[in-house]
Amino acid sequence: MSATPEAVAMLEKLITMHGPLMFHQSGGCCDGSSPMCYPNGEFKIGQRDVLLGEVAGCPFYIGGDQYERWKHTQLLIDVVPGRGSGFSVEAPEGVRFLTRSRVFDEDEQAVLACNPPARGS
């Protein structure tokens, strides 16, 4: 899990405005392939959701089905101009978070196989 400097700067701004934040990425409707950013605790994490790590101190969860599709990739959170759909806290700022990815190499995949991420509550 990583983020561009621009995404980190936007998160720092949003944290000063809203307090602690969290991300969730699902595969559903309403821009479901985009990461949604919420005040921490305002999105209910399900048993199948996977905690991938943190972005600028904000926990990042992904839906279990999405995790199965993307578990072989490193996710990079970026921020771009424009408004996505949904209720993500960055929308009023005229930007939206975006997930970019790259496939892990064989060595990285071996490490991940020994250290799987945690499932939600």
Image (cartoon, helix red, strand yellow):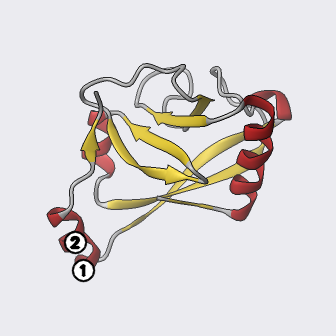
- In the image, what residue occupies the spot 65% across and 43% down? 97
Say what amino acid the circle numbered 1 marks: Asp
Image depth: mark 1 or mark 2 in front? 2
- In the image, what residue occupies the spot 28% across and 74% down? 108
Q: Nearer the viewer, residue 47 or 29?
A: 47
Q: Is residue 74 above or below residue 61?
A: below
Q: Give the residue furthest to the left.
A: 114
Q: Is residue 57 above or below residue 85?
A: below
The kind of secondary structure element at disc 2 is helix
- In the image, what residue occupies the spot 57% across and 50% down? 57
- Indicate the position of residue 93 as horizontal and vertical percent values: 84, 34
Categorize mark 1 by other alpha carbons within 10 Å: few (<14), some (14-19), many (20+). Answer: few
Q: Is residue 17 left or right of residue 116?
A: right
Q: Is residue 45 left or right of residue 48?
A: right
Q: Are marks 1 and 2 in contact (CB under 8 Å)?
A: yes
Determine which of the numbered discs, if any, sits on residue 56 in the image: none
Q: What is the distance, in whole Å, between disc 1 and disc 2 at their CAs?
A: 6 Å
Q: Give the residue furthest to the right.
A: 93
**Circle 1 sits on which residue?**
107
Task: Name the image quarter holding the C terminus.
Answer: top left
**Circle 2 sits on which residue?**
111
Which quadrant of the figure has residue 103?
bottom left
Count the labels in the image: 2
The kind of secondary structure element at disc 1 is helix
Q: Is residue 20 left or right of residue 28?
A: right
- Indicate the position of residue 82 as horizontal and vertical percent values: 79, 37
Q: Is residue 56 above or below residue 30?
A: below
- Indicate the position of residue 42 as horizontal and vertical percent values: 54, 19
Say what amino acid the circle numbered 2 marks: Val
